[in-house]
Amino acid sequence: MPQEKSRDRISEIFENKEKITQALADGVHEALLRHKQAGNPVVIWRDGKTVWLKPEDIVQDK
């Protein structure tokens, strides 16, 4: 059954937590880079509060 194979595949994908974590980190990196290039600020969580980060303060580690 196609639906059953789909569930098996999804389960298989979610078993690889390192791959998921890396994909999320890559997405955040790309989003920060695009915001910085476009001159747009981003909101981050710092010391229990939301803070606007200016484009020139966005640090890219990769």
Image (cartoon, rainbow, N blue to C red):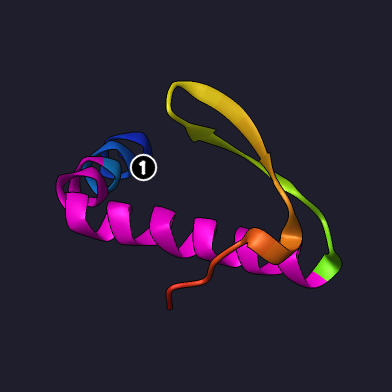
Q: Nearer the viewer, residue 7 or 44?
A: 44
Where 31 falls versus 43 (above or below)?
below
- x and y, in percent, of residue 36 in the image: 73, 66
Q: Quadrant of the C terminus?
A: bottom left
- x and y, in percent, of residue 18 in the image: 19, 57
Which amino acid type corresponds to the residue marked 1 in the rendered image?
Answer: Pro
Q: Quadrant of the N terminus?
A: top left
In the figure, is residue 22 to the left or right of 38? left
Q: Which residues are magenta?
A: 11-37
Where 47 falls versus 12 (above or below)?
above
Instruction: Name the residue located 36 percent from the left edge and 42 percent from the top edge.
Output: 2
Secondary structure mostly seen in magenta is: helix
23 falls in the magenta region: yes
Residue receiving disc 1 = 2
Instruction: Name the residue located 53 percent from the left edge and 22 percent from the top edge.
Output: 49
- x and y, in percent, of residue 59 in the image: 54, 66
- x and y, in percent, of residue 41 in the image: 76, 50
Q: Nearer the viewer, residue 59 or 32?
A: 59
Instruction: Name the residue located 24 percent from the left edge and 44 percent from the top edge.
Output: 14
